[in-house]
Amino acid sequence: MAKRSGAFLIYDPNIRKHNLENTRLREAFRENVAFADIVKGSDEDMVNLFATKDGEECLENIREINPSSSFIMTSGEEGVTGFSDGKKTVLPARDINVVSTIGAGDAFTAGLAYFLVKSKTANGWREEPPDLENMLNAGQSFAAAVCSSIENYVGKDFSFSL
């Protein structure tokens, strides 16, 4: 229903090893990928789903389900890799004092959503397509804010501009 209403969908599967035998969960994964505009997952998710953390191989697997979805893979201290519209962008991890990683993935996704909302105008995107590097930077900024604090959220003093 969300897709039919024109919603932009970001899907983060969060598949852990103990879920791998659940057939219904694997079917739900395929269905969610089929609807997603962006599939964003950690390298751990990708190993659990596709037995690899090679970004290109993961992208091929995702493209078998959804040929038009963008794909973003976070890899902790190895950084982030994004694929969109035939373009690959790799950003190194931020050099921060990590206090906790709880909520980092969700904060990264929130940064992507923030970027997309701020990049949209009444007539469409400011850039066609939205700039992948800037979108990944937004995700990293939000995740870095969460990882730098024991509170595990983006605080009131956080600022980020496009």
Image (cartoon, rainbow, N blue to C red):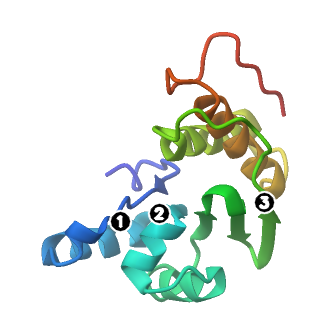
* Residue toward you, 7 or 18: 18
Label 1 and label 3: CA atoms lie apart by 22 Å
131 over 121 or under it: above or below: below
Quadrant of residue 139 in the image? Answer: top right
Of labels 1 and 3, earlier in sequence is 1
Image spot of residue 107 (x, y percent):
55, 38
Q: Can residue 128 be seen here?
A: no
Classify mark 2: helix, strand or loop.
loop
| Image quarter of residue 113 | top right
Q: Residue furthest top?
A: 156
Pointer 1 and pointer 2: residues touching (CB < 8 Å)? yes
The answer for how far apart the CA atoms under marks 1 and 2 are is: 6 Å
Residue drawn at 63 percent across, 10 percent down: 156
Report whether 161 appears left or right of 107.
right
**Which numbered disc, 2 or 3, marks the residue that appears first in the sequence?**
2
**The disc label shown at residue 36, or none:** 2
- Please name the amino acid that badge 3 sits on: Pro
Q: Nearer the viewer, residue 31 or 101?
A: 101
- The three-letter amino acid code for the residue at tag 1 is Asn
User: Which residue carries the number 3 mark?
Assistant: 129
Judge the density around disc 1: few (<14), some (14-19), many (≥20) Cα neighbours within 10 Å. some
| Numbered circle sitting on residue 153 | none
Q: Residue 32 carries which label?
A: 1
